[in-house]
Amino acid sequence: MHVDDIKARLHGALHRHPKASEAEVEAIAAVVLAIVGEVTVELAVVIAELAARVDALEAKA
């Protein structure tokens, strides 16, 4: 699925587009939640790596 398609479907569903069914809204919500979950995991990894680097630098100082 293309990013623009997701944006268009989400926009339409949120504005109660007459063609948006309940199943379509659920599908969009599932995709958005999956994306948010993946971004959260990636952010946690980056923060952990940065914390490890800071600890290493402080140990050297």
Image (spheres, grey):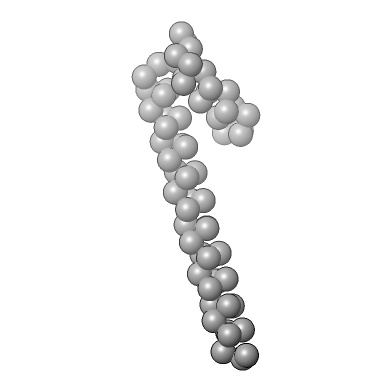
Q: How many marks?
A: 0
In the rendered view, would you say 1 is above or below 21? below
- 57 in relation to 8, above or below: below
Across and down, in percent, residue 7 comes to 57, 28
Tell me which corner region of the image, top left, top right, bottom left or bottom right, holds residue 6. Answer: top right
- 33 vs 58, nearest the viewer: 58
Residue 50 place in picture, x, y as percent = 57, 71
Q: Residue at x 47, y 57 (%)?
A: 41
Residue lying farthest front?
Answer: 61
Q: The N terminus appears in which quarter of the rendering?
A: top right
Task: Locate the C terminus and report the quarter of the image it occupies.
Answer: bottom right
Q: Is 40 positioned to the left or the right of 22 in the image?
A: right
60, above or below 54, in the image: below
Quick one: which residue is furthest to the top in this view? 18
Residue located 53% across and 73% down the image: 51
Residue 18 screen position, x and y as percent:
46, 8
Q: Is residue 24 left or right of residue 60?
A: left
- Return the residue found at the far bottom: 60
x, y percent for residue 27: 42, 29
Residue, x 37% and y 22% (percent of image)? 23
Report the residue at 48% width, 16% height from top: 15
